[in-house]
Amino acid sequence: MPRLLLILPLLFAFNAQAETLEIPIGQQGAVLGSLPQLGESRTSVLERFGLADEEHPAVGQPPITRWDYREFSVYFEHEHVINSVRHHQPRAATPAKE
């Protein structure tokens, strides 16, 4: 019984740390068009999306390169896409009503 009394406060402490993230239905899965897909070549990405706004040099082994476009970034391992990530687009602030 004493062990239960020691563990019980810990269970409540972890539960109190939880957060709820709510995303309005109108913003879920917003489509910006198709992003580069896993395995796609650099040449294909260049043909579909044009020159990147910024190209970062390769880092690590195997070499990972990042191309930044206005709305997304593409990560390459050698010559092929390993991931595409949309950038966070903050909503325009609405003026407070007085």
Image (tube, rainbow, N blue to C red):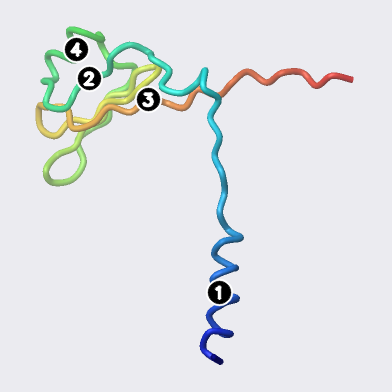
Whether residue 26 is situated above or below residue 66 in the rendered picture: above
Report the amino acid beneath label 3. Arg
Q: Residue at x 33, y 11 (%)?
A: 33
Report the amino acid beneath label 1. Leu
Can you give x and y, in whole percent of width and height, for residue 89 in the image? 50, 22
Label 2: which residue?
36
Q: Earlier in the sequence, mark 4 or mark 3?
A: 4
Q: Earlier in the sequence, mark 1 or mark 4?
A: 1
Residue 14, quarter of the rendered image? bottom right
Distance between mark 4 and mark 3 Cα atoms: 17 Å
Label 4: which residue?
46
- Bin the neighbour count of mark 1 within 10 Å (Cα to Cα): few under 14, some 14-19, many 20 and up: few
Q: Residue 86, labelled with which disc? A: 3
Q: Earlier in the sequence, mark 2 or mark 3?
A: 2
Judged from the image, the secondary structure of the residue bearing numbered disc 4 is: helix
Q: Earlier in the sequence, mark 1 or mark 2?
A: 1
Distance between mark 4 and mark 2 Cα atoms: 10 Å
Q: Residue 85, labelled with which disc? A: none
Can you give x and y, in whole percent of width and height, for residue 85 in the image? 33, 28
For this rendering, which residue is in front, 52 or 86?
A: 86
Q: Are marks 4 and 3 in contact (CB under 8 Å)?
A: no
Whether residue 58 is situated above or below residue 35 in the rendered picture: below
Mark 1 vs mark 4: give the one in front: 1
Mark 1 vs mark 2: give the one in front: 1
Distance between mark 3 and mark 1 Cα atoms: 38 Å
Judged from the image, the secondary structure of the residue bearing numbered disc 2 is: loop
